Image: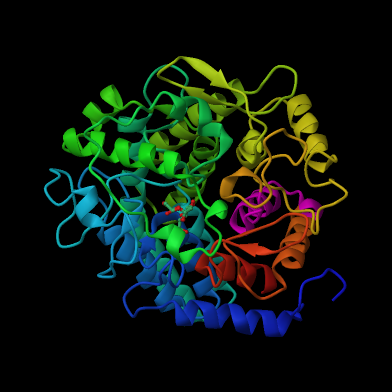
Amino acid sequence: PGDGRPVRYARAALAARAARVLRDNDTGSVITAAPRLYPHMWSWDAAFISIGLARLDLPRAVTELETLFKAQWRNGMVPHIVFTDDDAYFPGPDRWGTDSAVDGPHGVRTSGICQPPVHAIAVQRMLEIARTSSPEERGDAERFARSIWPALYSWHRWLVEYRTPGSSGLVAIVHGWESGMDNSPRWDVPYAAVNPGDELPPYVRKDVRIVGDPSERPTDKEYDRYLWLIEEMRRAGYDQREIVRTSSFLVGDVFITALFAVSCDVLVELGTEFGMPADRLADLAEWAARARAAVAGSCHSVSGMARDRDLRANRWLDTQTIAGFSPLLCGGAPDEVQLRLLSLLDSDRWCGHPDLLAPVPPSVSPMRPGFTPRQYWRGPQWPVVNWLFGWAFERRGWYERARELRAAGLRLTDDGAFGEYYEPFTGEPLGSTDQSWTAAVVLDWLC
Ligand code: 9WN
């Protein structure tokens, strides 16, 4: 193979392996995010998984998103984890303590926070895939898109009503897990202000026993903070207004805000096609415009990079991470800023770094002090993030760039391990292998 990795699979064999990963991770009711490390359904994982499944078995893809939305809270929140009976993951449902939450769902146990709103994107992609298939699949996908649309609308409305505090217009998160980029340096400053109290109940981590090298995972100190924030939310009874008012972590997340803007656009497109109420379409258009303006408004005057905002300390957070490229996902930044971001993305500080195995954007710039090539969201490349940028570039009509990202994503993942994340220089798969969402995006790239 020439890159030091043991095997490189050809397209057909890689697709067959990816399909097998999704089949093997299927418990019958949910496709777990990963075989041992993540034995439950995660919100944004389920969206990507449905896209991959749509290539294999459309009804199964539909069931996956229906299962997630059956766990939607009564106030509209889509929870970040829907628990199975497996107790190999910590924190499980008892530690979250959401069973008595007023707004919680009936008959299913979930965590008490959310994850990035990529579900509308998945539904539209499923529809596109089904339309290239039989008339029957096309009809099923259309019925599904129509039936899930109101739930998607109320999920988006929840993000506006409860999670867009203050004047920045950015969608706020109350836990790093909500960003999906748990220990990214984006959150170092706001996490430094989270002080786990003496009352933090003791706990034992399970993730570090499963991942062979614990240094690929967040540290114990980080976990104390993650658990402390859960403790604060339990004490607030999962009352969202109270959490946003009091939580020691409240950050406007620019990457989520960009995904929200473009997901609102997608919902408008779907809603227009399926004759959804005009007032709801107008809401979505307004939310998209506001979110897009917030992303553009966050851009640094020199670098052009988009920034998160610490809403407790009222200050911008300057970190050189992949989230800085958020305006490329949703548009709306001035042309000159966009051009600066595109040339930065191509430069040796990002995808053009000469030592990368594949030109997939790493989670943190390899030139940044503190870049850690093996540690989780602090350096490694994540195939799903690459998929999102490729999808957005295609949508924006940047076909050549989209094709290049697809090719780079396949170059990184053709070892057939379906790593959760990858060491950017050697291409070594890290964290979990046979990770469902990696298999799913690879399938989408291949088809
Ligand atoms: C916490 C499932 C999830 C992803 C996240 C990723 C990781 C969980 C963890 O795994 O987070 O939610 O235990 O580390 O950071 O993006 O959804 O794949």
Residue at image coords 51%, 15%: 315
Whether residue 56 is in magenta: the answer is no
- Would residue 313 appear left or right of 10 to someone viewing this image? left
Residue 145 % position (x, y): 40, 62
Closer to us: 344 or 396: 344
In the image, which residues are magenta? 380-401
Residue at image coords 79%, 58%: 358
Closer to us: 80 or 433: 433
Residue at image coords 20%, 61%: 108
- Would residue 146 appear left or right of 291 to someone viewing this image? left
Q: Quadrant of residue 101?
A: top left
Residue 160 % position (x, y): 36, 32
Q: Quadrant of residue 19?
A: bottom right
Q: Quadrant of residue 191?
A: top left
Answer whether residue 278 is visible to the viewer in this image.
no
Q: Quadrant of ligand 1?
A: bottom left
Residue 152 % position (x, y): 36, 50
Q: Is residue 17 above or below residue 238?
A: below
Closer to us: 421 or 15: 421
Q: Does the magenta stretch mainly form a helix, a strand or a loop?
A: helix
Q: What quarter of the picture does the C terminus occupy? A: bottom right
- Would residue 446 appear left or right of 196 to someone viewing this image? right
Whether residue 398 is in magenta: the answer is yes
